[in-house]
Image (tube, rainbow, N blue to C red):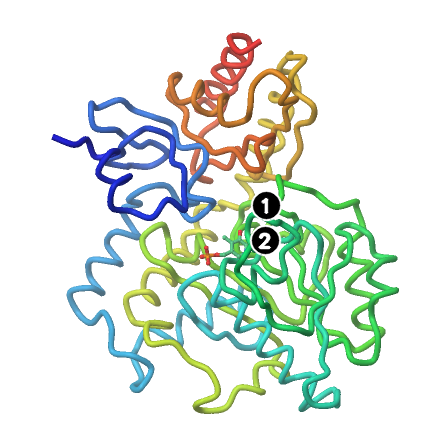
Amino acid sequence: MLSVIELERAYCAHNYQPLPVVLTRGEGCYVWDEPGNRYLDMMSAYSAVSFGHAHPRLLKALGEQAARLAVVSRAFHTEVLAPFVRHACELTGLAMGLPMNTGAEAVETALKAARRWAYEVKGVAEDRAEIIVCDGNFHGRTIALVGLSSEQNYKQHFGPFPMGFVRIPYGDAGALARAINPRTAAFLVEPIQGEAGIIVPPAGYLKHCAELCRAHNVLLLCDEIQTGLGRTGRVLACQHEGVQPDGIMLGKALGGGFLPVSMFLARREVMEVFTPGSHGSTFGGNPLAAAVGLEALKLLVEERLAERAAELGEYFLGRLRAVQSSYIRAVRGKGLFIGIEIDTGRFSARDLCMRLASHGILTKDTHESVIRLAPPLIITETELNWACDRIGDAFLEMG
Ligand SMILES: *Cc1c(COP(=O)(O)O)cnc(C)c1O
């Protein structure tokens, strides 16, 4: 009989290379595999599981709403949509929201809004709008979004790509100043680049970018799909610099670890470019997603998860920086969004992830040389201490 891993290999497209564990159950910060081994989840599904697995309050919201009314499409009004979007607006300081499902859809929505805004409000000539993006960006996997990427592996042989995008170095506000011209609609940026390897830009970068955008009537669009909802120690990562963007994208944790739920939020003037029929999604804003998303936003505030991430993240970062290994090149991050960059001369980040799995810690490498550490925000100091000791052990064994 074929094992689950062999079956997956036979039937499922090979667009991922999972670690060889078969997970069957999750609760809080932990997941269990088939033979019953317990692992500390230090990846949280790329921050989708920021509230931990099977959070009782989210599970309750999910069950109750699923039994009452789950999906009706936006052809009709439902009771939960407005409370959900209103809560998201109040939490982020933006006027209106447009719910979608995956992060990529929220980014596509932002790009559509920015282009329409350029033509209808800013007065850019039809089909001439430009959107500026950064080297190393990750905004999702649609054709348009991989077209923005500087990563060959994401885009090779998927072309041709849409036009109207300009790419500049990340972390360099001077490059943004030089790239802006009268046709520029928006600057799309991650406050901290996640998939690129937890890249924290120089202090003041986002603030400087925001000033440039305001001065030139360019929309600042922050992709907070991974950095948002408490991950970096603030509700939004852009709040570290007191920046209020013209639009943001949320996703991942917005679905409480249960469902794909995303949203584009923006100033009223930007969102009002959408008119009936101009954009949509069959599942976007469905009652089930709205009920879980609303409960997730309430939990974030009531359980002070952003504050926890700030305190625990600083502590964990300090402890990780004290781990002695000649293979560690850098330990960086903000809140509970941390990357360890290693010297890959002797072993890869994936080798280290395999070793960590044997010690009961699950995480994932990014770009062969960085190990991502982004546990559920409900993790405790005791669990972080345990994780840090195991990480130290793993480095010792590898070296
Ligand atoms: C994950 C991610 C996306 C895409 O989200 P999906 O739900 O996978 O489509 C977009 N932007 C950032 C910054 C992300 O981390």
Residue farthest toward the front in the current orientation of the protein:
157
Identify whether 398 is placed above or below 263: above
Identify whether 390 is placed above or below 113: above
Evaluate if marks 1 and 2 touch, with contact meaning CB atoms under 8 Å apart.
yes
Q: Residues within 10 Å of mark 1 (few under 14, many from 20)?
A: many
* Quadrant of the snapshot with the N terminus: top left
- Which amino acid type is marked by label 1? Gly
Snapshot quadrant of residue 82: bottom left
The alpha-carbon separation of the residues under discs 1 and 2 comes to: 8 Å
Q: Is residue 312 left or right of residue 190?
A: left
Identify whether 343 is placed above or below 334: above
Residue beneath label 1, please?
194
Q: Is residue 38 left or right of residue 169?
A: left
Q: Is residue 111 left or right of residue 57?
A: right
Foreground: 165 or 82? Answer: 165
Disc 1 within 8 angstroms of ligand 1 (CB): yes
- Which amino acid type is marked by label 2? Phe
Residue beneath label 2, please?
138
Residue found 72% across the figure and 75% down from its top: 130
Snapshot quadrant of residue 121: bottom right
Disc 2 within 8 angstroms of ligand 1 (CB): yes
Q: Is residue 62 left or right of residue 328?
A: left
